[in-house]
Image (spheres, helix red, strand yellow):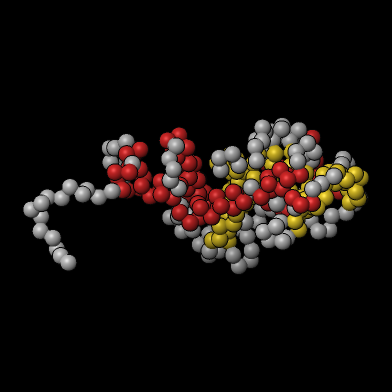
């Protein structure tokens, strides 16, 4: 999938905290938490926007904080379906790809021909019928029904991008999984489940440091064109941080090989 425009995935993850230790992180009556709202650039899995809030802030409110870029595609799940906000995004000249909720009230205006062998069931232009939704989004939308061959699930996508092929829209939504992988990676490898301080500033500072480490490691890997995972690169940096050596040499083939030029006078421990 190649696009000439930028594409971002918007999502959030919840980091659970202990209510008695972090009473400022409002979430539920018996739990505390903070939310990490992230806009991930799908071209390089680099976050371009982040906001840390308490656990009670609804995901859709992150749309109000974005500096919308005309021509850009924003990929979101169903939690961000708010037609008034989506219409604001549309009026800004930006595009969105999301999933439709099961209670969507709309009627078909036009159906484009599709190849059902590709998994695309239908590609329709629709108009909203609900009184509030029709007022919030008065223009037509594009609805694509797709059957995933791997899982057998039927998915319904909504978008205001009418010129891209239906399969490209489906592939865009599938690429949203990159932001989920980003959340899993930083939670697993960058130690943001245990915090050194209990104040709001201490927690947010530790999360920002973790994200900054991720971005720096990703930039180093890209600029040096290293064929290693982010986790491997992070591990190598952690053990060589005080050594004066070119970083590329740490990933050379010789660095992973033992020295075979043993002294002939060295006795062997075991012989068979």
Q: Residue furthest left?
A: 265
- Rendered position, 149 above or below 114: below
> Foreground residue, 52 or 212?
212
- Total marks shown come to 0
Q: Give the percent coordinates (x, y) of residue 20.
A: 53, 65
Residue 217 located left or right of residue 92 = left
Residue 110: which quarter of the image? top right
- Rendered position, 242 above or below 203: above
> Foreground residue, 35 or 231?
231
Q: Give the percent coordinates (x, y) of residue 158.
A: 78, 47
Q: Residue at x 54, y 61 (%)?
A: 17
Q: Residue at x 89, y 51 (%)?
A: 106
- Rendered position, 87 above or below 80: above
Residue 102 located left or right of residue 229 = right
Q: Give the percent coordinates (x, y) of residue 190.
A: 45, 52
Q: Residue furthest front?
A: 272
Q: Residue at x 72, y 61 (%)?
A: 152
The answer to whether any part of residue 141 appears in the image is yes
Residue 68 located left or right of residue 194 = right
Residue 13: which quarter of the image? bottom right
The answer to whether any part of residue 60 appears in the image is no
The N terminus is located in which quarter? top right
The C terminus is located in which quarter? bottom left
Q: Residue at x 30, y 45 (%)?
A: 255
């Amino acid at each position: 999938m190649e696009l000439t425009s930028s594409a971002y995935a918007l999502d959030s993850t919840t980091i659970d905290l202990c209510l008695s230790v972090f009473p400022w992180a409002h979430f539920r009556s018996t739990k505390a938490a903070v939310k990490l709202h992230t806009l991930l650039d799908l071209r390089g899995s680099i976050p371009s926007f982040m906001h840390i809030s308490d656990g009670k802030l609804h995901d859709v409110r992150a749309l109000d904080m974005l500096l919308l870029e005309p021509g850009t595609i924003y990929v979101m799940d169903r939690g961000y379906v708010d037609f008034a906000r989506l219409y604001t995004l549309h009026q800004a000249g930006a595009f969105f790809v999301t999933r439709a909720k099961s209670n969507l009230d709309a009627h078909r205006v036009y159906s484009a021909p599709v190849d059902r062998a590709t998994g695309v069931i239908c590609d329709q232009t629709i108009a909203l019928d609900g009184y509030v939704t029709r007022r919030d989004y008065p223009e037509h939308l594009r609805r694509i029904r797709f059957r995933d061959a791997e899982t057998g699930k039927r998915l319904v996508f909504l978008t205001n991008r009418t010129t891209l092929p239906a399969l490209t829209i489906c592939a865009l939504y599938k690429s949203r999984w990159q932001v989920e992988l980003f959340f899993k990676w930083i939670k697993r490898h960058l130690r943001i489940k245990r915090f050194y301080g209990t104040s709001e500033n201490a927690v947010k500072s530790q999360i920002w440091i973790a994200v900054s480490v991720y971005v720096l490691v990703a930039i180093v890997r890209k600029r040096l064109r290293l064929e290693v995972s982010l986790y491997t690169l992070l591990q190598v940096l952690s053990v060589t941080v005080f050594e004066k050596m070119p970083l590329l040499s740490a990933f050379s083939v010789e660095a992973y090989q033992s020295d075979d030029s043993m002294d002939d006078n060295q006795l062997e421990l075991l012989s068979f």
